[in-house]
Image (tube, rainbow, N blue to C red):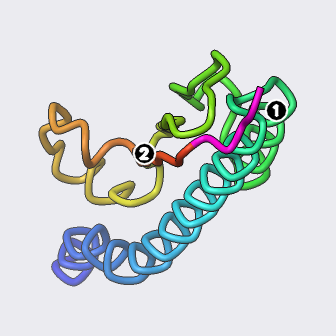
Amino acid sequence: MEKLLVLLMLLPLWLVVLFQPSLDRLEESREKVIQVALQRGIDKASLEGYFTEDIIDEMKDIVKKVGYEEDDIELELTTNPVLRGNYIHGKIKVPNEYQHLLIKNLLERDTSNEEEMYHVHIASRMSEFVN
């Protein structure tokens, strides 16, 4: 009985040690895909002068392929035409779901720090659009 009690007390720690590194790598890979989606989108938007609906849909499709729902994706993009020499800005924000999955549930950490709870990427590029 004593050994069973020790096993039950150590089981949560073992779960963290076994699975958290894999979950961290998974979330890091998802973050890289989000960066690529924003960079591709801003490259195309710099040629068009703004983020068109097609570019926005393409960015959302890329992000949805790694498991995010469309409601989870927050975009702040330049949607008005910008002439050459001015900057186009893009920001994408999605939840950080797996980075602290096991630790959050075990330790009930403070969730007021928004930086840890979301992946936020910002990019700017000079517009190449000529009227």
Q: Nearer the viewer, residue 17 or 24?
A: 24
Q: Residue beneath label 2, please?
A: 122
Image quadrant in which the N terminus is located = bottom left
* Residue 110, percent from left and from top: 12, 38
* Residue 114, percent from left and from top: 24, 36
Image quadrant in which the C terminus is located = top right
Distance between the Cα atoms at labels 2 and 1?
18 Å
> In the rendered image of this protein, does residue 14 appear above or below residue 51?
below
Q: Which residues are magenta?
A: 127-131
* Residue located 25% across and 74% down the image: 13
* Residue located 55% across and 58% down the image: 35
| Among the 4 quarters of the image, the one containing residue 78 | top right
Q: Residue beneath label 1, please?
A: 57
Q: Secondary structure at mark 1?
A: helix
| Among the 4 quarters of the image, the one containing residue 100 | bottom left
Badge 2 amino acid: Ile
Magenta span contains residue 94: no
* Residue located 39% across and 54% down the image: 101
Q: Can I make out residue 89 in this image? A: no
